[in-house]
Each structure stands twice: as structure tokens, then as C-alpha cells.
Amino acid sequence: MSARKITNQTNSEQQLTVNSRETHLTLSPDAVSLHKGGIEFNSTTAFPNWVEMTVTLKSPQEGATVNCTGVVVDCLGNKHSGYHVSMVFTSLSKQAEAQLSTMVASSIL
């Protein structure tokens, strides 16, 4: 599995939305590392392991969005320095997998 940081040099307003039952975060692409099977991001909010969340990703090239559901597998840090959250995607459709693969491939630094 490879990781790529989502960057968009032409549109700095691109955002990533993370939703859980009680939390809604909007993150900049600089705070995110996207993988084919998951995502890592920095957050000021802690998430318990195994909580299910939905991540909405927006492609910088086509503007298409992909909704990915997954579970938090790790959340390290503290309230003073922030948290590093690792999430694994679950039950991706073939279409979502294809869009995600395109996003990972197109976000090479």
C-alpha cells in the first residue's frame, strides 16, 4: 500500500470532510495522507479506535467527490499537540475504489 499526500497547487480552498456520529471536520489537503485502502489525517479532535466514520474526498482534477466509510484503527496524540488519526476504508464500491485509485495516483508530490 502506498501513501500520497493530497495536494492541490491550483486551488488552496479544496477541503476534506470527515464525519462521525458526533463530529464533523473539514480539513485542508495538507493535513491528509491518502492511501488506496485508507487515510491518515491530523485533527484537534480525538477519535476512539473502531469508531465508524464517513470521509468525503473531493478530487482536485475533476472535482468529483467520493464518500468512503471506514473505521479508525489508531489515534495518537493529545489535546495540546493534536491527534494523528489512521483510518481504514471498509466496503468500498468498485466505482469508489476506481475514483480513489485515480486520486491517489494523481496526487504525487
Image (cartoon, helix red, strand yellow):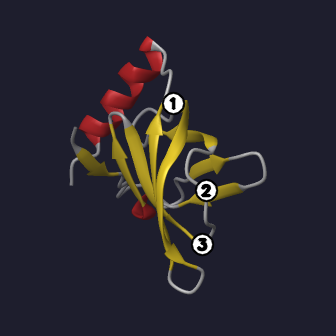
In what quadrant of the picture does the N terminus appear? top left
- Image coordinates of residue 85 in percent, x first then y, are 48, 59
Q: Residue at x 50, y 84 (%)?
A: 81
- Image coordinates of residue 40 in percent, x first then y, are 41, 54
Amino acid type at circle 1 is: Ala
Asked if residue 28 is positioned above or below residue 69 in the image, the reply reads: below
Looking at the image, is mark 2 or mark 1 earlier in the sequence? 2
Q: Residue at x 63, y 67 (%)?
A: 45
- Left or right for 80, reference 105: right
Callout 2: few (<14), some (14-19), or many (20+) C-alpha neighbours within 10 Å? few
- Given contact means CB atoms under 8 Å apart, are the residues at marks 2 and 1 in contact? no
- Image coordinates of residue 18 in percent, x first then y, are 61, 49
Q: Is residue 11 visible?
A: no
Q: Nearer the viewer, mark 2 or mark 1?
A: 2
- Given contact means CB atoms under 8 Å apart, are the residues at marks 3 and 1 in contact? no
- Image coordinates of residue 10 in percent, x first then y, are 39, 55
Mark 2–mark 3 distance (CA, rounded to whole Å): 13 Å
Res. 104 image quadrant: top left
Amino acid type at circle 2 is: Pro
Asked if residue 92 is positioned above or below residue 29 in the image, the reply reads: above
Callout 3: few (<14), some (14-19), or many (20+) C-alpha neighbours within 10 Å? some
Label 1: which residue?
64
Looking at the image, is mark 3 or mark 1 earlier in the sequence? 3
Label 3: which residue?
44
Q: Residue at x 32, y 29 (%)?
A: 102
- Residue closest to the eye, 32 or 7: 32
Amino acid type at circle 3 is: Thr
Asked if residue 17 is positioned above or below residue 30 in the image, the reply reads: above
- Residue closest to the eye, 33 or 11: 33
Label 2: which residue?
48
